Image (spheres, rainbow, N blue to C red):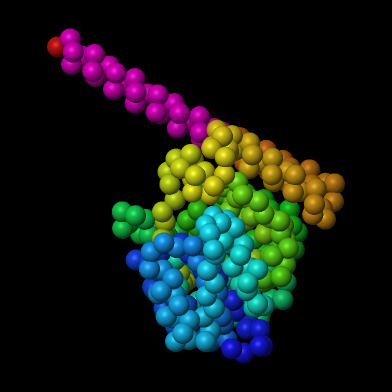
Amino acid sequence: MSTTPPLVSVGLPVRNGEEVVEGALRSVLAQQHEDLELVISDDASTDGTGEICRSYARSDSRVRYHRQPENIGLPANFMQVMHLARGTFLKWIGDDDWVAPSYLSRCLERFAADDRLILVTTQQVFLGEDGQAQTSAYPGRNPGSDRPVERFTEILRLLAEGYLPLDPIYGLMLREPVAAIPRRPMLREDEVFAAKLALAGPWDRVPEVLAHRGWRVPARMTQRARRLDVPAWQARAVNLLQCRELLAYLHQVPLTPAEEREARAEVRRLYVRRHQRTAVRGCHKLMRLVRSGAALTTTGTG
């Protein structure tokens, strides 16, 4: 194995992905940009994932396989990949994801054209468990402003609208500044991390579909809590905890007092929008229960 660090590290955290992981492996190794390493962190898989990954490591020197002795959980395994990576740039990829052969080349072109950037994203197709594919073009301007508060405002606006237009966690990023951003296990931590990324530096976007992502996020917050190994009670206060984490982080970045007030106001707006949406969903659920009860009563008296 070469001792010279590669330009790009692609990190694959995986657990029990034997049915899908080969697609991700092949798409990374088929990149037009070849100066890369594929770093796999196997979170103590109990299926054939290890055998598959080891076979790729034996046949391609760019593949580095690491196995955790015990299950450390999804968030910790993502960070393990980052700690193992050696490249100037890093991209995370899921075990059921796929990237086009030109993905790295197109993103690196953007970095070469603008040395301010810490992140480049592309348009992605999300494939749900039902087989339905969804995608969306970016609906606003790129968060490439030199003002951190403008980038922060833009990402909070996108988070309130949904995940389809932008998924920065799976973009190509400068590894060292991103590795310095603190993270901790919590619900919606990916969204919190995206907001922290926006404060860290400008982004750019390639307006082409260059990636496909499997989308298997549990619908209920309690299920997500179990998957992330966080306390179940967080599901009852997810909006509050997310906004509290964002507000706390604003004290750790170099903002002027006026910029911090502007950013704090955006966090409050995010909380209100999320709280209103939760309330509307609750009302709709209540109305369905009322209508269902009325129908049962009518049937019983008929």
Task: Give percent across and percent down for residue 208.
Answer: 47, 71
Query: Quarter of the image holding residue 126?
Result: bottom left
Residue at left 66%, top 81%? 112
Q: Which residues are magenta?
A: 275-301
Task: Give percent across and percent down for residue 53.
Answer: 44, 75
Residue at left 54%, top 78%? 64
- Front residue of 249/64: it is 64
36 relative to 261, above or below: below
- Front residue of 128/112: it is 128
The residue furthest right is 257
Residue at left 67%, top 71%? 175
Residue at left 60%, top 79%? 8
230 relative to 146, above or below: above
Left or right position of 220 against 261 = left
Magenta stretch prevailing secondary structure: helix
The residue furthest top is 301
Left or right position of 300 against 9 = left
Left or right position of 299 against 190 = left
- Front residue of 138/16: it is 16
Task: Say whether residue 268 is magenta.
Answer: no
The residue furthest front is 69
